[in-house]
Image (cartoon, helix red, strand yellow):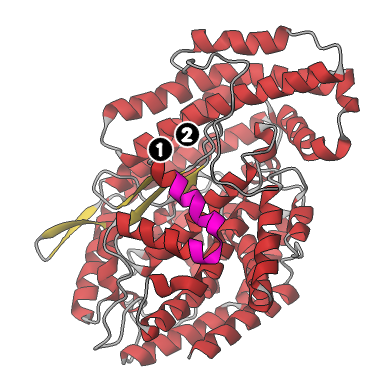
Amino acid sequence: MTLTADIKPIERSFLPTDFTITTWDLLEPYFQQLLDRTIHTKTELEQWLKDSSELEAVISEDACWRQVRMTCDTENKQLEEAFNYFYMEIAPKMQPYADKLNRKLVECPLTKELDADKYFTYLRSIKKSIELFREANIPIMAEMNVMQQQFGQIAGKMTIEVNGKEYTLQQAGKFLENPDRALREEVYMKIQNRRYQDREALNELFNKLVAQRHQIALNADFSNYRDYKFKELGRFDYTPQDCFNFHEAVKQHVVPLVKIIHEEQRKAIGVDQLRPWDMDAEPAGITPLQPFSTGTELTEKTIECFKQLNPFFADCLQKMQEMKRFDLDSRKGKAPGGYNMPLAETGAPFIFMNAAGTLDDVTTMVHEGGHAVHSFLTHHLELTGFKEYGAEIAEVASLAMELFSMEHWNIFFKDADELRRAKFKQLERVLTILPWIARIDAFQHWLYENPAHTADERAEKWMSLSSEYSTGLIDYSGLEHFLPYEWQRQLHLFEVPFYYIEYGIAQLGAIGLWMQFKQDQQKALHNYINALSLGGTKPLPQLYEAAGLRFDFSPGHIKTLMDFVKTEMDNLN
């Protein structure tokens, strides 16, 4: 396959080139045409699939743009109304048609003549959608899609004042790296108090979401939402028990390493007892890392970093820059977090984040850049459905890019010691994030296995998980009232339930690819590109195999990978 970032939008042959989605009445005839079409030959079936795919791509891109625009400006009521209109008025009417089209495909005798290998995962996904479809869930899902976005609206309004200037919470986070401990404590308390102010609003929102999700599961004949969601997410290759094994492995093989990191941090900043505002702090006399100042500078430096790694990676970001597919700087009224939004028809995705000039922002940018490269690598695939890959491989694309790109972080950090510090902090993060991932995932299993829980029981469960994944080295005296609500900062719980264990699974794959990279850079990058180019056309274990990896998150395998990361950290000291 020739690598090129000069992608072209999908050429329309079924829909008019000037068609845009405005109302259901104008969109419905295209669904009806597909439903009514008679299919006599395999060639006609393949054309029907391409036309269906084109319709899916146009609809998907329209919906994604509505979300992008709304998250970029949560205070714009017109953008909110456009998003809500799609999910309340258009999406619910599409779902019965989508189910009928799925059934038409599965029941068509000619479907048996399709290449079994090429269409295996696609047809498996179609059959799964048929199994899960229930008319009763359509209005609940419509309401839930709108309600989930309220988290961004609530969080987007959160700001604090530091030294007489207003900052978003993301921007204020950079003060937590400052050597001035009193300033760090002041900012930490302001951030926590601002979040605490909205704790009841977020609790109330979450109560409603849990109730809706549980009802969706019951309507689809599942006893709980966890089991429903495993099916919906296409988790064909692992089970809840595998997740529990991952949690235990993190406790056994990662938490002890994090304890070492915490103890070394305590010594480095010269305190008797670590407090939560000490975790990102630099020692006295050490200036916090400042890899860039503006979103534009972050883009330019990332492009240069990617160019050193592989020119194609840089070309992808340059193409996005030409198409104005970035919104990087943090500002009031912007939703929190960061994402790479695939845009199915035009191909070049959109990267959204809240940059404030920190190392974490560099990590976020190269992470989302990895997702963007994945989008470019799959744009050539015939059907929109072929590009729908699981998060367990999608996050390998992003997390491996974080590690690969470190080879060229001298673009961001000219000073040799700053470069060493940045790499060391990144590897610390590779380890310290895993207990949080395991904790969030364990929390979600409990939430949906116990859907009738109260807010107090939820807080109690969160606190019990805290003790299981804690190093015991951070003193929270006087802060106990904040801790039961700590989970509320994790947007995935509100917006994309059960999407979190994937980061842990994929981190293992990313470390595996980085091990390859340390041995043979070109071979590792070849494996990376090879696996990502397959999109969702192969089962997960085969995608990992294409990357030269084992789909394995057993305790023994995790220990091997963690030992490798620890050795690399020791080599930087």
Pinpoint residue 329: horizontal percent, then vertical percent: 30, 52
Please name the residue shown 77% across and 46% down the image. Answer: 538
Three-letter amino acid code of the residue under disc 2: Cys
Say what secondary structure mark 2 lies in.
helix
Residue 80 sits above or below residue 394 on the image: above
The residue closer to the viewer here, 312 or 104, is: 312
The residue closer to the viewer here, 225 or 323, is: 323
Disc 1: which residue: 68
Disc 2: which residue: 64
How many labels, in total? 2
Query: Magenta stretch containing residue 223, yes or no?
Result: no
Pinpoint residue 386: horizontal percent, then vertical percent: 70, 37
Q: Which mark is residue 355?
A: none
CA distance for labels 2 and 1? 6 Å
The residue closer to the viewer here, 185 or 212, is: 185
Residue 386 sits above or below residue 33 on the image: below
Q: Main secondary structure of the magenta part?
A: helix
The residue closer to the viewer here, 9 or 494, is: 9
Q: Quadrant of residue 189?
A: bottom left
107 relative to 175 in the view: left or right: right
Residue 420 sits above or below residue 407 on the image: below
Residue 186 visible here = yes
Q: Mark 2, residues whose alpha carbon is within 10 Å: few (<14), some, or many (≥20)? A: some
Q: Mark 1, residues whose alpha carbon is within 10 Å: few (<14), some, or many (≥20)? A: many
Please name the residue shown 54% across and 74% down the image. Answer: 431
Say what secondary structure mark 1 lies in.
helix
Query: Magenta stretch containing residue 315, yes or no?
Result: yes
Pinpoint residue 402: horizontal percent, then vertical percent: 52, 65
> Which span of residues is magenta-colored?
307-319
Please name the residue shown 86% across and 11% down the image. Answer: 40
